[in-house]
Amino acid sequence: MFAAGFDLGTKNCTIAVAQKGGVDVIANEVSNRLTPTLVSFGEKERYLGEPAATNQLRNIRNTITNLKRFIGTDFKNSEGELVQESFSSFELPNGQVGFNVNYLNEPLEISADATVGALLGKLKRTTEAFSNTPMREVVISVPGYWTEYQRRALLNAGAIAGLNITRLMNETTATALSYGIYKDLPETDPIRVLFIDIGDASTSVAAVAFKKGELKVLSTAYEPNVGGRNFDNTLVKHFQQEWKQKYKIDIFENKKALIRTRQACERLKKMISSNNEAPISIDSLMEDKDVKGTLDRKTFEELCAADLESILAPVKKAIEASGITADQFTTIEITGGGTRSTSVQKKLIEFLGRDLSKTINPEESVCRGCSLQCAMLSPLFKVRQFAINDIASYPISVLFKSASIQQNLALFNLTSPVPSPKPLRISFPISKAEPFEIVVSTTYGTLQSLTVQNVPAFTNKSSIKAKVWLDIHGVFHIDEVRLVEQLPEDQQPEQSPKDSDQKMGEAVEGEKKEGEEKKECEVKKPSPVKVKETPLQFQFAPVHGLSPADLLKATEEEGRMHAQDVLAAETADRKNALESYIYEMRSRLSSSLAEYATKEESTKLLALLQEAEDWLYGDGEDTLKSVYVAKLEELTKIGNPIAKRRQDNEEYPEAVRSLKDTIAHYREQAMTPQEKYDHIPAEEKEKIITECNNTEQWIDALVKKQEATPKTSACLINIAEVNAKKQLIAATSNAILNKPKPKPVPVATPTTPTTENTEAPASSAETQTPPQPESEKPKSADMDLD
């Protein structure tokens, strides 16, 4: 039983698992805690994570990078960034980003949602391999600035991967949770912490207040296009100019050279953080030319001055929105891979005028917070009570429009809680029964749009009401559109006699006089204003993202591609097994198995091994799994009996020795007189001795016969049979020797004769009690009292 959290980063992903004993960040199949955010499509299978990084330079046109930047985004808005990538892309019918790749030697068009779904499936299988149990639920982190389109797209990707996503959690909120849940927090005066998260492609800042058992996000600010890779790109441009003049090559004309240069610049950036000067060197970058260069920290800061300055913008904005100054924060925590740079830290210290705290693990804090949130949302875990009060990232407004009226209403602002504590009821007064449209929009576009064509006629004051809310993922919902009509008292619906009787006042009984009849008066209570609510049928306009039909199709396609991946992996495993057997058996035939194989067997097997090797590197280079299995079985049919002879000849002496030790032990127990075995009949002990002698004669004869048998023949001693004989002797002997001693027969005690008229001895004068006077004699318990 576990709760999982995924940190889906631009460059790498991390996985944390909360279970009994704490939270663990788990490693992937190559023991790395960071899994590259890469998906590569090959000729036989897909490569996800680490394998994709290994094959990237060999398959750059079919390797999708920066997936997080493209999921749920409009193609037109991302076109400027897509042209810099090595893969091909296109615009989907819904306006979002799709990729053109070559998969199984055929062209394939795939959406960003489905591609991310494949990567999430990889993370899911890694988690299940670690815990050996199926994954029930997961919380995934997202940048706080993500739009609703991107959040819905990630939920679709999770559905494609077969994940139950219980929450999409803002990255800074997840960091705050992992930071504060274990701390001893005050009950009244909150501590205020500023979190600065500089990732690979973006910067997020959040001001958070902590009290005992809760955190509250005060303000947030983001810079979606400023991160660690901005420094890498600046260095790439610098060395491109330098090498263009020095080596007469342009790395922008070669995709592989550009990728290798960017990787080298990233390493250079890390080295400059701990050294004043660092070298860069790449062998055979382009046109068989080796390139090299150096850069010092001062030059680095001059080149990246604009990038360093752009990081300060969201920091300043978040502090201003929080309403407090930088020196009023209890601490300022930095996280994210970009904060490792000493130049970045120096710039932040200069701007804030105070030291920074680096107690948070920059790569693992987000996934840890997500796993804790998953455990808190799961009914299977008991976690410390800790409330999370997050806020909306964008303002949301709703527009009501018809032919005769148009009204606008602000619903949520940047301080609105997420999720909404309860649904909001919005109302728009209307004067005509006419079709209308409700459009929900925000700063980046329209979220939802619904249309009502049939509005029933009405004659009284009426309005349109609807229910709206933000769910736990930060996604907007609208539902229950109704026509609400106020009814005057004289137009209230007719009531049944039973209802009328219930609404009549009780009879009031007046003073009674003899001979007069009872008088009753009925008091009628005033009726409240009545409303009539009529549900309206509405229709949503298509929104950004996959339609239900497209989502189902993508899920089925992911299942087929995963099955192909499994088959390709199993085929490669069988091919490797065949290749290993060929080399191993050929080596053993000339060494450890030489004396156990006849000349004919050795010659035949060597010929088959050579034939299989020639086939494997020829026609068998790419074939079916079943063919590799059949080839291996053909070789093992001859090779395994030879290996079995060697194994049996080496192992049977130990089995024989163990059997003889067992025989000697139980025979000695049966033959040696011992007090604890005196109760066992002699014939029972004789059974043990006879069984031991017979078994000893059997094994001695078998060993003698085996010693006369050549090693090229099958071993006559069956080790399993020898072990069975050993167990039989032990079981038979223990059943006899462990019989309990019989209980001793109880001895009858003689009865003492008694005389009926025997007088009791007289008491001595010293022990006799003197007679008591009548007044001092004890009274009876039932004595009557006068």
Image (cartoon, helix red, strand yellow):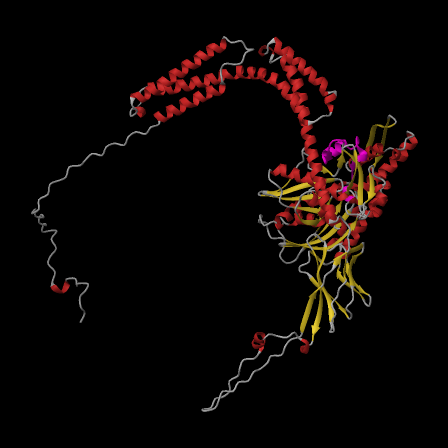
Q: Left or right: 131 with respect to 112? A: left
Tell me if I can see residue 323 in this picture. Answer: no
Q: Which residues are magenta?
A: 43-69
In reply to whether residue 231 is colored magenta, the answer given is: no
**Who is closer to the viewer here, 497 or 484?**
497
Q: Which quadrant of the rendered structure holds the N terminus?
A: top right
Image height of 477 relative to 457, above or below = above
Tell me if I can see residue 225 in this picture. Answer: yes
Image height of 62 relative to 521, above or below = above
Spot occupied by residue 158 in the image (x, y as percentages of width and height): 69, 45
**Who is closer to the viewer here, 605 or 199?**
605
Image height of 260 relative to 510, above or below = above
Image height of 419 relative to 599, above or below = below
Spot occupied by residue 756 in the image (x, y as percentages of width and height): 8, 46
**Who is closer to the viewer here, 786 or 19?**
19
Spot occupied by residue 523 in the image (x, y as percentages of width and height): 57, 82
The quadrant holding residue 769 is bottom left
**Who is closer to the viewer here, 680 or 332?**
680
Q: Which quadrant of the rendered structure holds the C terminus?
A: bottom left
Q: Left or right: 138 with respect to 433? A: left
The quadrant holding residue 48 is top right
Q: How many marks?
A: 0
In reply to whether residue 62 is colored magenta, the answer given is: yes
Spot occupied by residue 720 in the image (x, y as percentages of width and height): 49, 21
Q: Left or right: 138 with respect to 146? A: left
Which residue does the image show at 66% across and 26% down from the upper left? 626
